[in-house]
Amino acid sequence: MRHALITAGSKGLGRKVTEMLLEKGHSVTATYRSNAESLRELENKYPEQLQVIQADVTKKDDLQRTVEQAMERFGRIDCLINNAGPYVFERKKLVDYEEDEWHQIINGNLHAVFYLLKLVIPIMRKQQFGRVINYGFQGADSAPGWIYRSAFSAAKVGLVSLTKTIAYEEAEYGITSNMICPGDIVGEMKEASIEAARIIKDKRTPVGRSGTGEDIARAICFLCDENSDMITGAIMEITGGMDIIHRFR
């Protein structure tokens, strides 16, 4: 049984990814920061497959403990899904950011991935198999400016390069490294199905419906598949054609 470690897997996009991985037969270690209750239903349904751990991705010790507990219970880590990522929802320019906000965004979106890769890649090398999935944003591959999102965009653009570098460095060990870039998926749509989204028309999105957590989960499960080994270093946009970063000027 393949084992997946996903950060912030208790709610939102992460919840849907956790759910689909379990449905497809993976065992999963999912972290949460403050809300364990949202995973109780899945814990009851998949008691042998799911492990839930409280962790703050901005804290190195929490990441170390998470990896140790995943290995202690399941003995392997095949897929690392870096779903967690702090975000400042208030729209404000760089000069208006507090230093603590800047550091939290960079630490949670970039440094946390570095620490987890340092911990998990040696495990994947021994297995001769691994799948690393990071999250970006529309256009991250070309390093665009994103007004009011300076810290988040800086971290994710840095993560693009890290994603591709790991793809080159670890290919010989059967490890792939890719990034998915979700579109404007908000509110209840983060945990919604594609079927539910098709009922509600979305004029902002060229395909005519909102993106959903299922869209993201399907892409991640595809990239985690054993036969997806030819896909590495890829930056996959799942936006429905929406131009997200240029909506606000």
Image (cartoon, rainbow, N blue to C red):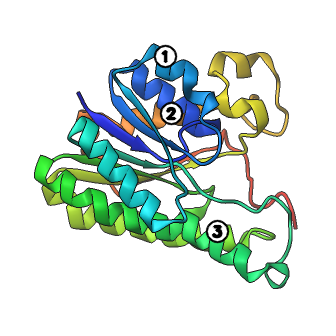
- Report helix, strand or loop for mark 2: helix
Quarter of the N terminus within the rendering: top left
At 63% across and 29% down in the image, what residue appears?
38
**Image coords of residue 47 (percent x, y):** 40, 20
Q: Residue 203: which disc?
A: none
At 64% across and 21% down in the image, what residue appears?
193
Q: Horizontal placement of 190 versus 8: left or right? A: right
Above-or-below relation of 246 to 32: below
Q: Give the residue number, with chain letter if any, for mark 3.
A: 105
Name the N-terminal-most of marks 3 and 2.
Answer: 2
The reply to whether discs 3 and 2 touch (Cβ–Cβ < 8 Å) is no
Q: Amino acid at mark 1?
A: Asn
Residue at mark 3 to residue at mark 1: CA–CA distance:
33 Å
Residue at mark 1 to residue at mark 2: CA–CA distance:
17 Å
**Image coords of residue 14 (percent x, y):** 56, 39
Is residue 144 visible to the viewer in this orientation of the structure? Answer: no
Q: Give the residue number, with chain letter if any, for mark 1.
A: 44
Name the N-terminal-most of marks 1 and 2.
Answer: 2
**Image coords of residue 87 (percent x, y):** 70, 60
- Report helix, strand or loop for mark 3: helix
At 43% across and 64% down in the image, what residue appears?
61
Tag nearer the camera, 3 or 1: 1
Q: Quadrant of residue 90?
A: bottom right
Name the N-terminal-most of marks 3 and 1.
Answer: 1
Q: Amino acid at mark 2?
A: Val
Above-or-below relation of 125 to 110: above
Tag nearer the camera, 1 or 2: 1
Residue 104 versus residue 233: which sits nearer the camera?
104
- Report helix, strand or loop for mark 1: helix
Q: Give the residue number, with chain letter if any, for mark 2.
A: 17
